[in-house]
Amino acid sequence: MKIGLIGNMNNNHFAMARYLRDRGFDATVLLTDREYPHFHPSADCIDGSHKVLCRQLAWGSAQSLRRVSGKCMANDLREFEVLVGCGLAPACCKRAGRRLDVFIPYGGDLWEATMFRPCRPQNLVVAWGAALAQRRGIAKVSVVHMSPMTMYERRLARLAPRSQRWREGLPMVYHPMYEPGQMDPLLAATPHAKRFLAVRSNCDLMLFSSVRHAWRLHPSDPNAKGTDRLLRALALVRSWRPGLRVRLVTMEYGQDVAATKDLATELGIADTFEWFPTMARRELMAGLLLSDAACAEFETSYDSSGVIYEALVAAKPLVMHRTDADYLPTAPPGGLCPALNGREPAEIAERLLWVADHTAEAKSMGERGRTWYAEQVARRTLDRYEALLRGRGAGA
């Protein structure tokens, strides 16, 4: 039995394909015509394994959904008995006369991709046609696999009322590749190694944030990251502990990069920032492994994301906003992932100083996070997929 995984947002399906192959299943990542360069599978490996595990499609975007025939899509999918996908995979499978077996939404494919939003008249047919097809495709999905996310629950209930729901976290980071002992190969694979090492050697507290700079948005927008809260927290840290050398490693990634730089200057903390270009996961993981703590999002409460799971795999204490009460009812047997929870600047600043002042405890917390990910996310989720596949006759 062959498994096709359509799309690769956040490198989610490339990691899944590697985990499935480790368990003896024939899994292939089907890359669409709308993949982000920093999420390409080549950005998440150093051994060239993506050449074996991946195949390029000529469709997957809203434009190609209208342009490419359903027959062509059906031919591309014919050899795969089980289809797993994200993005517009539900719409594309419907056009191909197939049903997507497992839909793994990343957010935008449930939100923007299903909305009939205002657009230019010449784009109306493509945009609204894709939104309609996506809605119809999601309605026929057999399983929706998405860890609980309060921002999307109501919409998902409306779009896929009859689909089975899996709430396990998605193992979107292949943790065997990022063992703490892999530091040297990862540093050798990034052109940023010298700068990462220089930052590490010239500060007392090295923080890492690969979150997209998108914070001048309405709080109800799921893209709002709350980056400004982190900046104000860093200003408090400086005022409370002026002798502490703090550096924040971050990327020029997102619509509000310039606004972040302006706010940092206004707050007098511009020298705290170490700006890097958007980079591949294998590169940013090298910097993360050198850091003392990772910073996630501070606007919306989340319990899982690429940024969160990267921090857990790197065994780093995680500073983030999470409303635990929203996630405890559906938490795995091992509970929620360990996190230093804070949302307001003063709370965040206190968590950052705790990391600086309690190095042994912070290290232990990071190690617990890595174990939690391996057991509560990777193992439990792959057990679920293995049961599904073996139930359909897939052999090792």
Image: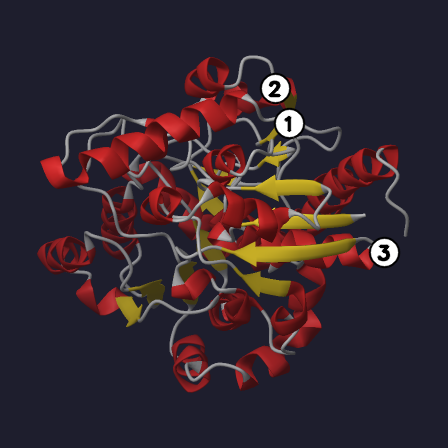
Image x and y of residue 9, in percent: 47, 51
Above or below: residue 344 compared with residue 156: below
- Name the residue carrying label 3: 24
Mark 3 surroundings: few (<14), some (14-19) or many (≥20) residues within 10 A: few
- Asked if the residue under mark 2 is in contact with the one under mark 1, i.e. CB atoms within 8 Å, the reply is yes
- Residue under label 1: 143
The answer to whether the residue labelled 1 contacts the one labelled 3, judged by CB atoms less than 8 Å apart, is no
Q: Where is mark 2, residue-wise?
A: 163
Label 1: element kind: strand
User: In this orientation, which residue lies closer to the viewer: 352 or 337?
Assistant: 337
Badge 2 marks a residue whose secondary structure is loop
What is the x, y in percent for residue 214?
Answer: 25, 46
Q: Secondary structure at mark 3?
A: loop
Image quarter for residue 184? Answer: bottom right
For label 2, the crowd category at 10 Å Cα-Cα, with few meaning under 14, some 14 to 19 and many 20 or more, is many
Q: Choose the circle earlier in sequence order: 3 or 2.
A: 3
- Structural distance between the alpha carbons of marks 1 and 2: 5 Å
Q: CA distance from mark 1 to mark 3?
A: 22 Å
At horizontal 66% and vertical 51% (from top left) the residue drawn is: 16
Amino acid found under the numbered disc labelled 2: Ser
- Along the polypeptide, which appears first: circle 1 or circle 3? 3
